[in-house]
Amino acid sequence: MDEGPPVKMSHHAIRLRGVSKRFRRHQNVRQRLLHMLRIDHAPEIIWALADVDLAIHHGESVAIVGANGSGKSTLFNLIAGGTNPTGGRVHVDGRVGAIVDLGFGFHPGWTGRENAEFHVRLSHPSRADRAALVAEIAEFADIGDAFDQPLRQYSTGMVMRLGFAAAIAGEPDILLVDEALAVGDSGFQQKSYRWIEDFRRRGGTLLIVTHRLDILPQLTGRAILIDQGRVIADGTPKSVIHQYAQQIFGAGGKAAQAARKIGTGGAQLMWTAGADDAPLVMGGTGADICFRVRFDRAFANPTYGINIRTIEGVLLSHVNSQMRGVGPSPVLAGDVVDVAIHLPTSLPAGEYGIDLMVHDGDGQYVVIDGQMDALRLHILGERQQLGLFDLNVEFAIRPLAAEAGC
C-alpha cells in the first residue's frame, strides 16, 4: 500500500528545544587509539551547538547563515537525522528530503539506476510505486544513457544531478538544501531553483544553508544567523544578511581580523557622502558618490568596489575599479585616497542599498574594509515599468502599410 503523505500532527515542521551537540577532537590517530583503549588521554571537547531553541512552521522558507565552523552543518545534520543531539530534543513533522552532500550514500560501482533503486527502497520502504519513483529520478536527472553506467564514470555535475533528483523524488514535506546547489552547470541550477520555487508555492517547508547571500531574499522569507553554536539573530533575510556582513566585514569583524593575520593589510573607509544616513537622490542624469579611504599599510594595487542591492537585499550589480581598468595605483601606509564613482540611471524608480568596499587588489578581491548599506539610493522617475532594470526600451506604433513590415 502507498504510504501516502504523512499526517501533520503539529503546526511546527521543525522544533528544537535546548539542543546541544558535543564532539571529541583528537590531535592525531595515536591519541584517538589511546582514547578507544581507555588509556589516560583526554580529547578536546568541542561544543558545535549550545542550547539551541528553534521553531519552523509548515510552509516556511528559512535560511541558516554563519561563518565556517559556526554550527550550521551540525544543525542541518541533526534535523536530517544524520546524527543525534548530545542534549535536548529535535522534532521533525513530515518526510524530509536532504540535499546535504550530493552523492553521499551512492556506491561508485553501481549504475545510476541501481543507486536510485537502492535510495528509493530506503527512503520509501512501503510505497508500491517505487519503479515510478526511479523513472522520476531518471527524468529529472536527465543524464541519458549514463543512468545505466557505473557512478565512477560520472562527472561531479552528473553525480549532483542524480543526487538532487533522488532527494526530491516523491516530493518531501521538508526540503533541506546545503551548499551542494552551488555545484554544476547553470542550466541545472536554474532547473533546481525552479523546482524549489514550485515546492514553496505548494506549501513545502524549505531550510537552506548557503554562503550565496544574494539569493536568500528570493528563496526565503526568514533567516537565522548562527555563531559559535548559538542563534544570535532571527529575522528578515535583509536584516540578518546585514548583521552577518557587519560581523564578517565590519570593524573588528572576522574577515577583517583574518586579513590582518595573514598580512594583507588594512584600511579605513571614511564617508564623504551619505554620512547623515539621508538617501542619495538620483534623477535622470545619474548620481555621484565619493568616499575617502585611509590606508594602514602599503598596497601595490588596491581596488575599490561597489554593490547595488534592492531594498530586500538582492545583489543587482558588483563592479570595482580593477574591472573598469583603473589602476594600478600603489599606496603607502598613511596615504589617504578619495574615490569618486558616477552611477548612470539604469534602474527603475525606487530605493536601493549601496555597499562600499576596498579590496587588496591581488585578483581575489579579498575585502580589506567595507560596509553594507553604506548609502541609500533613491531613484526619482516618472516612467513606469516592472522588473529590475531600466532598459530604455522605445516603442513605435504605426498603421499597417502594405509595402512595409516591421
Image: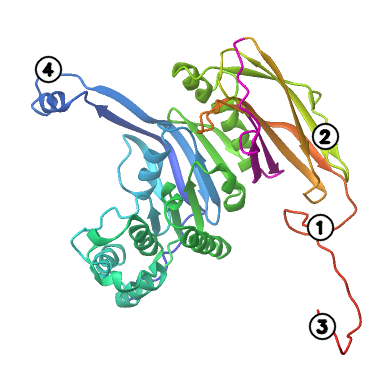
Mark 2, Cα crowd under 10 Å, few <14 / some 14-19 / many 20+, is some
Question: In the rendered structure, which amino acid carries the disc numbered 3?
Answer: Gly
Task: Give the residue number, with chain letter if any, for mark 4.
Answer: 40
Query: For the magenta stretch, what is the residue range?
Result: 304-333
Secondary element type, mark 3? loop
Task: Give the residue number, with chain letter if any, for mark 2.
Answer: 280
Residue 303 coordinates in the image, percent (x, y):
61, 28
Task: Please give the name of the residue rendered at 54% of the width and 22% of the height, measured from the top-left corner.
Answer: 253
Task: Give the residue number, with chain letter if any, for mark 3.
Answer: 405
Residue 48 coordinates in the image, percent (x, y):
37, 31
| Disc 3 versus disc 4: nearer the observer | 3
Which of marks 4 and 3 precedes in the sequence? 4
**Label annotation for residue 392:** 1
Label 3 – label 4 distance at C-alpha: 90 Å
Question: In the rendered structure, which amino acid carries the disc numbered 2?
Answer: Leu
Question: In the rendered structure, which amino acid carries the disc numbered 1?
Answer: Asn
